[in-house]
Amino acid sequence: MPLASAPAVVMPPLASAAPKVVDPVDALFGGPPPSAAEPEPPAAPRAASGSTGRTTLSDMLGEDSSLDELAELSAFSGRSSTVEFLAKALAPELERPAQTVGPDAPPPAVPEEAFDDSLITSKASDSLEDRKARLIARMKTTRSAFKISGLLDITDDERKEVIGMFGEYEARLKALAEGGPEQPKKDLIALHKALPKEALDELERAIMRIEDRLLVLDEFVPQDKFRARVTKEKHAPKLLLRYARLLACRRFNVGYRRDRFEHLVNELLTVATSDGRWRLLPRDKARPVLMQLLSGQAPSSQDGGREAAVAYLRESLERLAAIATHEEFFESGFFLDVYGYKISMRDQATSPEFLYLSIALNAEIHNRVESWIAGLERLHKANQLTQDGPPREYLLSQLRSQEEAVQSVFGSFRHPKDKAQAQAQAQAQQANARALAQETKETKQEVRKAPKKKKKEEKQISGAESLQQLAKQQMIRFAVLSTLIAASFGYVLTSTGILSFAADDNGGMIAPAQVHDLSPLIEFAFRMDNGKWLRGTVKDPQWRALDTTQRRGAAERFAKKLAQAGIPNAELMVYKTAAIRIDLGVISYVEPASPK
């Protein structure tokens, strides 16, 4: 069945120009300004501290709102009694088209002209102004993600912790910016633009810590709750776009985070019609969304792999067009193949064309399932069905079971964590650490007392036996102390998410001496995937001091060391930027030096 052209999607007019510079995401999703006849948006209640005044919807979504307002919004949105208000206040600004799609309408077309990496090449530039722009974008991303987190059941202590991190960031920003004390309190954008070059490294590290903490909080949200609560019916599209940016700010592992990223892009690139179907935005409308979504992302270095992945998705669209019934759909294993393939190709998730075709395929599957549900419901009403339960529940349960089957095939598939279980494990680790500390203390006391108690006996022991006994005591002492240090270090790594990442990939941290032997440029590194992958970071100042030729030479020396160590693949990062990538022993990418 050939693919037909999709009807044009009606997009809302852009918001009227404001006195300040319009943010690209605001310009993309900003709706028309309210008319004089429309009522003012409802005022949000103030925090329980007793302060007076009103917080309008504009204040709640403002980019340069103060830290106090951010704290009030988070505390307010975390109350269960206000969910209904937020659902209305944060209504989607992307209008639905007036035209509907009939039950027998053909699927939307996916034209042959493909998106390329020109949408995301902003990552290549490392000029002072580009670094400031990226830092501003990351600041906005983290603040928007924190606004959404109020509906994701974070605790008061977690909320206070993140607010404290924002407070520390803003304090350092004001202290480091040129003329910071004279800048208006809320003008965070101006403060960023006034930063000198030497201050950027410190603030980039600070914003990275905030990103890491928000990702840890996201990991404790159940997948079903996330999909139900993070939609454009409950949040403005620009907030969804920025939350998707947060999820993509670290390389996707095999797990839930890639699925959540795709869910948010589904929300941004599809429009629901009155009959429950999804209409994919045409490419001219999807392009600016993808540009803002993927801005600053490093293009995948696997060009050949990308071409094959795109070809697979196009072929899957053609396969789906030939499937007529839901029995054929599930028995053919089509969904198992497609979902499993997208998980295995997670590195292509931020490739524009691969991402767009993935959403096109999701929309087609959704629309087919809706058509089959409608047909089965007619048979259900006529008592002509043999299966039990409503048709919608039956088909969706089939999809869920196949999704779970695929995840079980990937033994390292990472699911969201259970918060209560994680807290119990942390408490057990702390108890073990305290017990080990007490045991070490008692051992030290015994070692100190032993010579006094056995003074007479030691005189009768030969010199060789004395040395042997002392060595044995020292070995016991060293073993206990090593266990304590390892347990404490493991607790720190577990609390920050590092140890769990390494364990999931059957690897571990490489000792500093071995890291330096591989390359003096490496700061730290992990072995993963049963030793087949090495991932780590390079020392930023030393890396930036090298020109392109020197970087290539360092990469070649590193590749030789890897080959000697029997590690075929490696990826070294400098912050979020890929510095060196080696695939199957071949150097596939080296970050070029910025022009002086």
Image (tube, rainbow, N blue to C red):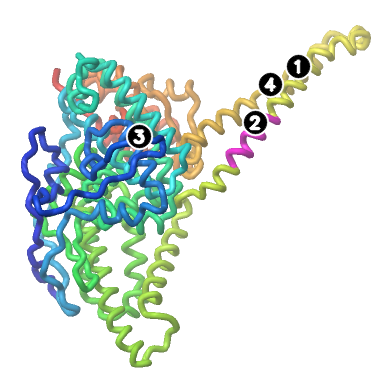
- In contact (CB < 8 Å): disc 3 and disc 2: no
CA distance separating discs 1 and 4: 10 Å
Residue 261 visible in image: yes
Percent position (x, y) of residue 142? 30, 37
Q: Which residue is mark 1?
A: 471
Comparing labels 1 and 4, the label whose residue is closer to the camera: 4
In the image, what residue type sits under mark 1? Answer: Ala
Question: Magenta stretch mostly in which secondary structure?
Answer: helix
The circle on residue 51 is: 3
CA distance separating discs 3 and 1: 67 Å
Q: Residue at x 56, y 48 (%)?
A: 421
For marks 1 and 2, the one nearer the N-term is 2
Q: Nearer the viewer, residue 512 or 42?
A: 42
CA distance separating discs 3 and 4: 57 Å
For marks 3 and 4, the one nearer the N-term is 3
The circle on residue 433 is: 2
Q: Nearer the viewer, residue 14 or 56?
A: 56
For marks 3 and 1, the one nearer the N-term is 3
Q: Secondary structure at mark 2?
A: helix
Q: Is residue 538 above or below residue 570?
A: above
